[in-house]
Image (spheres, coloured by chain):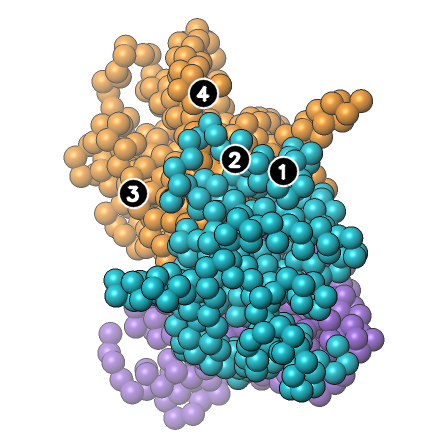
Amino acid sequence: MEFSAALLVSAIVAGLLLGGFYAAVSVGISISFGMLDVVNIAHPAFIILGSYIAYIVNDRFGFDPILVSVVLSPVFFALGMALYRIYYLAFERRGQESLRGLAFFFGVLFITEVSLVLVFGVDYRLVQTGYSEITWRFGEIDVPMRLAVPFAVSVAMVAGVQSFLTRTFFGRAVLAVAQDQLALRLMGVNPFRVKELAFALSIATAGVAGALLIVIQPVQPSIGREYIGLVFAVCVLGGMGSIWGTLIGAFVLGIAESFTSTFFGPSWAPAVSFGLLLATLAFRPTGLFGR
Amino acid sequence: MSNKLFAAVAFAIAVAIAAGSQLIGNEYFFTATYTVLQFIILATAWNILGGYTGYVNFGTAAFFATGAYTAVALYNAFHAPLIIMIVAGTVAAGLVGLAVGYLTLRLRGVFFAIATLALAVVLYTFVVNWDYVGGARGAYILQPREIPLGLPRYIHVLYIAMVFMCAFALVVARAIETSTLGRGLAAIRDDELAAECSGVPTLRLKIFSATVSGALMGMAGTTLPYYLSYVEPSSAFSLSYAVNSIAMPLIGGMMSWLGPLIGAVLLGTIQQIVQVTVSSAWNLLIVGVLLVLFVTLAPNGIMGWFDAWLRARRRS
Amino acid sequence: MAARAEALVNEVLLDVRGVSKRFGGFTALDGVDLVVKPGERLGLIGPNGSGKSTLVNCITGALRNEEGSIHFEGTDVSAQPPHRRIRLGLARSFQIPKPFSSMSVLDNLRIPLLYAARQHERIARDRISDVAMDILRQVGLADKADAMSGGLTQVDMRKLELARAVAAKPKLLISDEAMAGLSTSEVDEILALLTSLNRQGIAIIMIEHIMRAVMKFSERLAVLVAGRKIADGDPQTVASSAEVVKAYLGE
């Protein structure tokens, strides 16, 4: 294989574009796990669900999947609220979240995947958009629209979440609930409602991320599981609960995967995110920015 | 009942089952019950780290496949006899448990759980890219032509091996459960910080638990190559192993060796029936739904119901 | 070796020197010094958030202090994990009780008896139940020996916390707000218990907000405010000093 500057730059560009998308995929976990301490390993299940809903609407009506997902985000929001309620009543309140809560979310992940297999089968599904086939060329560097559009939407979404968290009252309450629930209560804010809202937000982002995913690549039910390592790797790398950290962690991962894929072959790519996660957990669990 | 007596009884029952199986004419019996036996070992193994110590392992498949692929590698190297495959696979999986445990058990249980998930994917990727054991295409294993003990077919040998391995796993689990070590593990499960501050060397016990658990899971996988005659990564690393090894102890009861046994027999039998009458996808859906229902509504499982019933009787 | 000898000659059980602990940008402890002699009754008070629990966590090893050292009976334990420290005889109770909820009250005591006490006092396995029952009798939980520890009343949970600490055969026991939120008579129960434990030779650091109990119990009183020790000496003198009164205005 020829090593050229163009190949290198292509890999970096692809990595950055992918990284932006990975940030969108992981921002939900930053909230639910990083801030609320809820180990929602079923997060990727909602991403895949988002992908399939986008696929159905696109297949039937031809609507743009990303637009559809934004329009449907209240549905995911409500789903997130319901899920948090069950989790809270069954586990958090009883102090059982470590073992049983984990098993619960794993069960949810599993049920979602198997249900999708039953309904859609294991074939790959993809969407048709106006821009899927377009690629912009900058000299020798290709920027495919199917990567660039999701990248733009991802960055917008992550920036939006960050704005919400730092500039609105409820957003700041979310940041506060991660640190001091008692203080919140003394201020007259109900911590449960804040956490419920935050968790619902995380699921809503998953729904949108799902639509972005299916624009980038064809999707089949088991892909969700591959993303577990990715989202937690990004979250841990970025130092948990920091949106900026998540963004940077996502770029690191995106570039690492892109390089591995380009120079070693795509069959090694899944090992990158999980390997990075294992290494981070083993040697620097506080993330790149350590606390 | 002392552990020595329990071991003797378990061994005796194993011998009886092994001998009795030779009277059964239906060959399908061996295939159907092989799966249940496999689940008994996996569920019992998982519960040592899960139910006894409180650390969830999502990567059962990683340890199981380590056992299976160690067997494959030994077969390719020098057509190793079954007993060597079993011992080597068990040790290999135990080493994996030791390594992962050493690296990640200093962290919160959550991170360990995620690490086990990561482990499964990393090992899967390695195996897929390792041609010596067949890579993605898979490896073919031929059952030996010479069948020991004068048995009619080789699957009978595998079946008997599994029966004894089940007995072994149950004896080990019970021995741990009733020992000082087991009390220490229970303390870790109930409140790790309080355990540590009460003198329990938590890290050491956790690593031990992870090693034994991993080893036994690997042991369950060592007979897979001869059983299927063909081993390929996506089935060796199937998610069904992870979900079943969690659901069975959960449904049966995580506090004692009996729970995983009950859960495995019950759930394993249900799955065999559903698989034959409906399909394997529905099969998995049922397991998943039962897992979620039990963990939410009946977290102490069937044994928990039984204990509650006993306590109610004692009160009245 | 020399340090141990020195400690024994000067009779110092616990020697905390210059301990500092930071959480990110927040300094929880700032150069705290504290000395406890064998059999001593030390009271430790301070407003909420002053770092008392952090100090206990650093002394027992649940947290690692960034600066300073902790010596127990002359041995430097600063780098040792909690389970080693308690085996040396440094025990604590938890402010919010942490019972082993899947076990009975009696079985809760087995853990420290098996893992901590046996290290320096060979207790035959068949005697463990008896020793545990003795301790339960001492704290007044004997009739609840078989009860599940998760369902106890608050005051019984506090007693179980102390019983578990005692089961480790400690030389020093840190009682972390064992009386918080209890009724007057319950406070007296705990006070009587701590006093009788002290009479057996166990040094006790009592961390409390209930001033009458602290004043009644302590031979010496130390005050922690915003991570710094601002007073350490005779209880009456310390309690009436201007600085301490100011720190507690509103308390």
Q: Is label 3 in contact with label 1 (beta carbons under 8 Å)?
A: no
Q: Is residue B158 visible?
A: yes
Q: Which mark is residue B285?
A: none
Instruction: Looking at this view, name the residue that lies furthest to the bottom.
Output: A139
User: Alpha-carbon distance for marks 1 and 2?
Assistant: 10 Å
Q: Are marks 2 and 4 in contact (CB under 8 Å)?
A: no
- First of labels 1, 2 by sequence position: 2
Residue reaching furthest right? A188
Q: Colour of chain B?
A: orange
Chain C's colour is: cyan
Label pair 1/4, CB-CB below 8 angstroms: no
**Residue C52 image position (x, y, % from top left):** 58, 71
Please identify the quarter of the rendering in which residue B301 is found: top right
In contact (CB < 8 Å): disc 3 and disc 2? no
- Which amino acid is tagged 1? Arg
Circle 4: residue type: Ser
Which residue is labeled 2 in the image?
C131
Horizontally, residue A108 falls left or right of residue C233, namely: right
Figure colour of chain A:
purple
Separation of marks 3 and 1 at Cα, in angstroms: 50 Å
Q: Closer to the camera: disc 3 or disc 2? A: 2
**Image check: B175 left or right of B67?**
right
Mark 1, residue position: C137
Label ID, residue B2? 4
* Tag 3 residue: B92
Image-based side of A110 in relation to B9, left or right: right
| Residue A173, percent from left and from top | 73, 78
Looking at the picture, tell me which residue is in the foreground, C154 or C100.
Answer: C154
